[in-house]
Protein backbone atom coordinates (compact mmCIF):
# COMPACT_ATOMS: atom_id res chain seq x y z
CA UNK A 1 0.00 0.00 0.00
CA UNK A 2 1.31 3.44 -0.94
CA UNK A 3 2.01 5.83 1.94
CA UNK A 4 -0.50 8.61 2.57
CA UNK A 5 1.61 11.77 2.63
CA UNK A 6 0.19 15.01 4.01
CA UNK A 7 1.87 18.39 4.35
CA UNK A 8 0.46 20.89 6.84
CA UNK A 9 0.60 24.57 5.87
CA UNK A 10 -0.06 26.98 8.78
CA UNK A 11 -1.50 30.30 7.59
CA UNK A 12 -2.05 33.57 9.41
CA UNK A 13 -2.98 36.71 7.41
CA UNK A 14 -1.22 35.45 4.28
CA UNK A 15 -3.64 36.87 1.69
CA UNK A 16 -1.19 39.49 0.40
CA UNK A 17 1.70 37.13 -0.22
CA UNK A 18 0.55 33.52 -0.56
CA UNK A 19 1.12 32.17 -4.10
CA UNK A 20 -1.56 29.52 -4.40
CA UNK A 21 -0.71 28.27 -7.95
CA UNK A 22 2.72 27.12 -6.70
CA UNK A 23 1.08 24.56 -4.41
CA UNK A 24 -0.05 22.54 -7.44
CA UNK A 25 3.40 20.90 -7.50
CA UNK A 26 2.41 18.95 -4.38
CA UNK A 27 -0.80 17.71 -5.99
CA UNK A 28 1.16 16.60 -9.06
CA UNK A 29 3.40 14.53 -6.75
CA UNK A 30 0.42 12.84 -5.10
CA UNK A 31 0.88 14.71 -1.82
CA UNK A 32 -2.12 16.05 0.06
CA UNK A 33 -2.16 19.51 1.63
CA UNK A 34 -3.84 20.47 4.87
CA UNK A 35 -4.08 24.24 5.28
CA UNK A 36 -4.60 25.54 8.81
CA UNK A 37 -6.16 28.98 8.90
CA UNK A 38 -4.93 30.26 12.24
CA UNK A 39 -7.65 32.81 12.99
CA UNK A 40 -6.73 35.10 10.09
CA UNK A 41 -8.47 38.48 9.95
CA UNK A 42 -7.84 39.13 6.24
CA UNK A 43 -9.00 37.18 3.15
CA UNK A 44 -6.78 34.17 3.82
CA UNK A 45 -9.72 31.94 4.75
CA UNK A 46 -11.71 32.62 1.59
CA UNK A 47 -8.65 32.19 -0.64
CA UNK A 48 -7.84 28.85 0.93
CA UNK A 49 -11.47 27.70 0.76
CA UNK A 50 -11.50 28.43 -2.98
CA UNK A 51 -8.31 26.44 -3.51
CA UNK A 52 -9.62 23.48 -1.53
CA UNK A 53 -12.87 23.53 -3.52
CA UNK A 54 -10.82 23.22 -6.73
CA UNK A 55 -8.86 20.23 -5.43
CA UNK A 56 -11.24 17.89 -3.58
CA UNK A 57 -9.43 14.95 -2.06
CA UNK A 58 -6.07 16.66 -2.49
CA UNK A 59 -6.47 19.67 -0.20
CA UNK A 60 -8.37 20.32 3.00
CA UNK A 61 -8.87 23.33 5.23
CA UNK A 62 -8.83 23.28 9.03
CA UNK A 63 -9.81 26.59 10.61
CA UNK A 64 -9.04 27.75 14.13
CA UNK A 65 -11.52 30.19 15.66
CA UNK A 66 -8.81 32.47 16.98
CA UNK A 67 -5.13 33.04 16.38
CA UNK A 68 -3.17 30.49 18.43
CA UNK A 69 0.31 30.92 16.97
CA UNK A 70 2.31 28.80 14.55
CA UNK A 71 3.16 26.13 17.13
CA UNK A 72 -0.47 25.29 17.85
CA UNK A 73 -1.51 25.68 14.20
CA UNK A 74 1.10 23.09 13.20
CA UNK A 75 0.20 20.76 16.08
CA UNK A 76 -3.52 20.93 15.27
CA UNK A 77 -2.79 20.33 11.60
CA UNK A 78 -0.53 17.35 12.22
CA UNK A 79 -3.07 15.78 14.58
CA UNK A 80 -5.79 16.34 12.00
CA UNK A 81 -3.66 14.63 9.35
CA UNK A 82 -2.99 11.70 11.68
CA UNK A 83 -6.71 11.36 12.43
CA UNK A 84 -7.41 11.05 8.69
CA UNK A 85 -4.94 8.22 8.11
CA UNK A 86 -1.71 9.92 7.09
CA UNK A 87 1.37 7.68 7.30
CA UNK A 88 3.95 10.38 6.57
CA UNK A 89 3.37 14.00 7.57
CA UNK A 90 5.27 17.25 7.29
CA UNK A 91 4.88 20.97 7.48
CA UNK A 92 6.10 23.92 5.46
CA UNK A 93 5.63 27.68 5.50
CA UNK A 94 2.80 29.33 3.59
CA UNK A 95 5.23 31.68 1.82
CA UNK A 96 6.99 28.64 0.29
CA UNK A 97 10.41 29.95 1.28
CA UNK A 98 11.30 26.29 0.81
CA UNK A 99 10.17 25.71 -2.81
CA UNK A 100 7.86 22.72 -3.40
CA UNK A 101 10.52 20.55 -5.11
CA UNK A 102 12.76 21.01 -2.08
CA UNK A 103 9.98 20.22 0.37
CA UNK A 104 9.23 17.09 -1.63
CA UNK A 105 12.89 16.04 -1.28
CA UNK A 106 12.58 16.44 2.49
CA UNK A 107 9.38 14.37 2.45
CA UNK A 108 10.99 11.68 0.28
CA UNK A 109 13.84 11.38 2.79
CA UNK A 110 11.50 9.72 5.30
CA UNK A 111 12.10 6.11 4.32
CA UNK A 112 13.97 3.08 5.56
CA UNK A 113 15.17 3.79 9.09
CA UNK A 114 14.67 7.56 8.78
CA UNK A 115 11.77 8.74 10.93
CA UNK A 116 12.40 12.50 10.84
CA UNK A 117 13.81 14.70 8.06
CA UNK A 118 14.71 18.34 8.62
CA UNK A 119 15.33 20.83 5.83
CA UNK A 120 18.70 22.50 6.40
CA UNK A 121 19.81 25.83 4.92
CA UNK A 122 23.50 25.28 4.20
CA UNK A 123 24.92 28.00 1.95
CA UNK A 124 27.34 26.12 -0.31
CA UNK A 125 28.61 26.89 -3.81
CA UNK A 126 26.09 25.74 -6.39
CA UNK A 127 23.13 26.23 -4.08
CA UNK A 128 20.73 29.17 -3.88
CA UNK A 129 20.26 29.93 -0.20
CA UNK A 130 19.12 33.55 -0.15
CA UNK A 131 19.22 34.62 3.48
CA UNK A 132 20.13 37.98 4.96
CA UNK A 133 23.46 38.06 6.82
CA UNK A 134 21.62 39.10 10.00
CA UNK A 135 19.29 36.11 9.88
CA UNK A 136 22.15 33.79 8.95
CA UNK A 137 24.30 34.72 11.94
CA UNK A 138 21.36 34.80 14.33
CA UNK A 139 20.51 31.36 13.01
CA UNK A 140 24.01 30.05 13.72
CA UNK A 141 23.80 31.27 17.33
CA UNK A 142 20.35 29.73 17.67
CA UNK A 143 21.49 26.41 16.19
CA UNK A 144 24.35 26.21 18.66
CA UNK A 145 21.96 26.86 21.54
CA UNK A 146 19.49 24.30 20.12
CA UNK A 147 22.22 21.65 19.95
CA UNK A 148 23.05 22.28 23.61
CA UNK A 149 19.37 22.13 24.58
CA UNK A 150 18.84 18.86 22.71
CA UNK A 151 22.13 17.22 23.58
CA UNK A 152 22.69 16.34 19.88
CA UNK A 153 24.37 18.24 17.06
CA UNK A 154 21.95 19.88 14.67
CA UNK A 155 22.72 22.50 12.03
CA UNK A 156 19.31 24.06 11.43
CA UNK A 157 16.24 23.45 13.58
CA UNK A 158 14.27 26.50 12.43
CA UNK A 159 13.90 25.88 8.71
CA UNK A 160 10.17 25.56 8.10
CA UNK A 161 10.45 22.28 6.19
CA UNK A 162 10.13 19.09 8.19
CA UNK A 163 8.74 15.59 7.67
CA UNK A 164 7.91 12.70 10.01
CA UNK A 165 7.02 9.05 9.84
CA UNK A 166 3.77 8.55 11.72
CA UNK A 167 4.63 6.46 14.78
CA UNK A 168 3.36 6.05 18.33
CA UNK A 169 6.20 8.33 19.36
CA UNK A 170 4.95 11.10 17.08
CA UNK A 171 1.39 10.70 18.32
CA UNK A 172 2.64 10.96 21.89
CA UNK A 173 4.75 14.04 21.07
CA UNK A 174 1.72 15.82 19.58
CA UNK A 175 -0.73 14.86 22.32
CA UNK A 176 -0.40 18.08 24.34
CA UNK A 177 0.25 21.74 23.49
CA UNK A 178 3.81 22.95 23.17
CA UNK A 179 5.17 24.97 26.08
CA UNK A 180 7.32 26.88 23.60
CA UNK A 181 5.72 29.35 21.19
CA UNK A 182 8.90 30.37 19.39
CA UNK A 183 11.06 27.23 19.45
CA UNK A 184 8.40 24.56 19.11
CA UNK A 185 10.42 22.80 16.37
CA UNK A 186 13.11 22.11 18.95
CA UNK A 187 10.56 21.10 21.57
CA UNK A 188 8.95 18.64 19.16
CA UNK A 189 12.31 17.09 18.35
CA UNK A 190 13.16 16.91 22.05
CA UNK A 191 9.87 15.14 22.78
CA UNK A 192 10.57 12.61 20.04
CA UNK A 193 14.09 11.94 21.29
CA UNK A 194 12.89 11.77 24.90
CA UNK A 195 10.42 9.01 23.97
CA UNK A 196 13.16 6.91 22.34
CA UNK A 197 13.51 4.43 25.21
CA UNK A 198 9.92 3.25 24.95
CA UNK A 199 8.97 4.05 21.37
CA UNK A 200 12.07 3.44 19.30
CA UNK A 201 13.16 6.96 18.28
CA UNK A 202 16.94 7.46 18.22
CA UNK A 203 19.11 10.38 17.08
CA UNK A 204 20.26 8.18 14.18
CA UNK A 205 16.65 8.10 12.95
CA UNK A 206 16.83 11.85 12.24
CA UNK A 207 18.50 13.31 9.14
CA UNK A 208 19.08 16.85 7.95
CA UNK A 209 18.50 17.39 4.24
CA UNK A 210 20.64 20.23 2.81
CA UNK A 211 18.38 22.34 0.61
CA UNK A 212 19.41 23.30 -2.90
CA UNK A 213 17.25 26.42 -2.78
CA UNK A 214 15.67 28.60 -0.09
CA UNK A 215 14.85 32.30 0.04
CA UNK A 216 13.86 34.91 2.55
CA UNK A 217 10.36 36.09 1.67
CA UNK A 218 9.37 39.68 2.27
CA UNK A 219 6.88 40.02 5.10
CA UNK A 220 8.33 37.26 7.28
CA UNK A 221 7.08 37.54 10.86
CA UNK A 222 10.53 36.84 12.35
CA UNK A 223 11.90 39.72 14.45
CA UNK A 224 14.71 40.34 16.92
CA UNK A 225 12.14 40.13 19.72
CA UNK A 226 10.94 36.78 18.44
CA UNK A 227 14.52 35.50 18.36
CA UNK A 228 15.02 36.60 21.96
CA UNK A 229 11.85 34.82 23.03
CA UNK A 230 12.96 31.74 21.10
CA UNK A 231 16.25 31.84 23.01
CA UNK A 232 14.38 31.87 26.30
CA UNK A 233 12.28 28.94 25.10
CA UNK A 234 15.48 27.05 24.27
CA UNK A 235 16.81 27.66 27.75
CA UNK A 236 13.60 26.24 29.21
CA UNK A 237 13.83 23.15 26.96
CA UNK A 238 17.46 22.58 27.94
CA UNK A 239 16.75 22.94 31.65
CA UNK A 240 13.78 20.58 31.39
CA UNK A 241 15.92 17.96 29.63
CA UNK A 242 18.63 18.28 32.28
CA UNK A 243 16.13 17.85 35.12
CA UNK A 244 14.69 14.70 33.55
CA UNK A 245 18.11 13.15 33.00
CA UNK A 246 18.54 10.07 35.25
Image: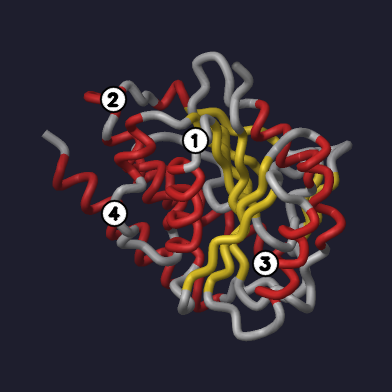
Q: Residues within 10 Å of mark 2 (few under 14, many from 20)?
A: some
Alpha-carbon distance for marks 4 and 3?
34 Å
Residue at 50%, 56% in the rendered image: 74
Q: Is residue 1 left or right of residue 201?
A: right
**Residue that mark 4 sits on:** 176
Query: Can residue 100 be seen from the camera position used here?
Result: yes
Mark 4 or mark 2: whose residue is earlier in sequence: 4
Q: Position of residue 135 (x, y in %)?
A: 65, 63
Mark 3 or mark 2: whose residue is earlier in sequence: 3
**Residue that mark 1 sits on:** 85
Alpha-carbon distance for marks 1 and 2?
20 Å
The mark found on residue 134 in the picture is 3
Q: Is residue 102 left or right of residue 76?
A: right
- The answer to which of 186 and 200 lies nearer the viewer is 200
- Assess whether mark 2 and mark 3 are in contact (beta carbons under 8 angstroms): no
Alpha-carbon distance for marks 3 and 2?
39 Å
Residue at 52%, 22% in the rendered image: 114
Q: Residues within 10 Å of mark 3 (few under 14, many from 20)?
A: few
**Residue that extends furthest to the bottom in the rendered view of this protein:** 41
Mark 4 or mark 1: whose residue is earlier in sequence: 1
**Residue that mark 2 sits on:** 199
Residue at 48%, 77% in the rendered image: 67
Residue at 23%, 24% in the rendered image: 197
From this view, report whether residue 24 is shown above or below residue 54: above
Which part of the image, by quadrant, shows the N terminus? Answer: top right
Mark 4 or mark 3: whose residue is earlier in sequence: 3
Amino acid sequence: MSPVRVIVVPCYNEAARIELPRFSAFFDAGVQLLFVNDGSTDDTGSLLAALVAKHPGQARLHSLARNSGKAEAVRHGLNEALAHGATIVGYTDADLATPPPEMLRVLDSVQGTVQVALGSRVALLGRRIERSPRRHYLGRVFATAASLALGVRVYDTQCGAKAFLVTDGLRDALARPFASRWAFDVELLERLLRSSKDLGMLPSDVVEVPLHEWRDVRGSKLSATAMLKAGLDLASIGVGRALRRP
